[in-house]
Image (tube, grey):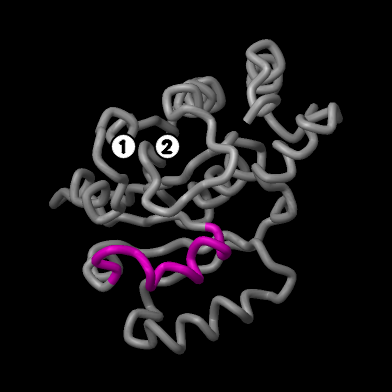
Amino acid sequence: MGKLGIFGGAFNPIHIGHLFVAKEALKIFQLDKIIFIPTGNPVFQKEELLDKKDRAKLVNLSIKDEPCFEESLFEVNRDVPSYFINTLDQFMNPHDDLYTILGEDTFILFHKWKSYREIISKTNFIIAERFEDSFTISKKYIQTYFPDFKEKIFFLSHPLYRISSTLIRERIKSNKYISYLVPKEIEMEILNKRYYKNI
């Protein structure tokens, strides 16, 4: 039985925090592979959202040299809204246990997702640190909404939790450096294409 990581998100843009979390999850939870799945058509409104194909290209550039990372365009290639239950079903198989990677800020809204009870019955969760509270908010959230699923929810502390796509977009619009916050190829692509300047 293998362990397959599912890492979905807007990746608007992808940054070193995303990549560090994926690498750390791979090692700590002994995952065989992590699939990055850029959101195609978000169900919840996203601010300053770059075109889905451009975001997918940035993800591909970021992970192309990592043998245990791959990208899926399942959501990008669909015209319908990106409900995670449909994405999860796409990767369900009899050979792998699924581990879905989510940031804390996303996880504490999980009860608003379509078919959230069905989702949590089908996958484990790896919750990546986003708040300065030692997962206190997330643990209270689990106790309130998912006390019967505690054994399927794992926590991942990491040192880059302050880095966010919002921070990077703000720095771009303020003409500040984003060097070392994103991979070099991503920085050059963003600057050359003037992404986020006019959104």
Q: Residue at x 54, y 85 (%)?
A: 140
Q: Position of residue 188 (x, y in %)?
A: 69, 15
Q: Position of residue 107 (x, y in %)?
A: 48, 66
Q: Secondary structure at mark 1?
A: loop
Q: Is residue 185 above or below residue 42?
A: above
Q: Position of residue 122 (x, y in %)?
A: 23, 64
Q: Choose top left, top right, bottom left or bottom right for residue 47.
A: top right
Q: Residues within 10 Å of mark 2 (few under 14, many from 20)?
A: many
Work out whether residue 28 or residue 34 is closer to the camera in this orientation and state it.
Answer: 34
The residue pinned by badge 2 equals 38
Q: Is residue 137 above or below residue 115?
A: below
Q: Position of residue 27 (x, y in %)?
A: 52, 49
Residue type, mark 1 in image: Glu
Work out whether residue 27 or residue 195 is closer to the camera in this orientation and state it.
Answer: 195
First along the sequence among labels 2 and 1: 2
Labels 2 & 1 near each other (Cβ < 8 A):
yes
Task: Give how far apart the Cα atoms at labels 2 and 1 are.
Answer: 7 Å
Residue type, mark 2 in image: Pro
The residue pinned by badge 1 equals 75
Q: Residue at x 46, y 81 (%)?
A: 142
Q: Residue at x 57, y 59 (%)?
A: 128
- The residues colored magenta run 103-116
Work out whether residue 116 or residue 128 is closer to the camera in this orientation and state it.
Answer: 116
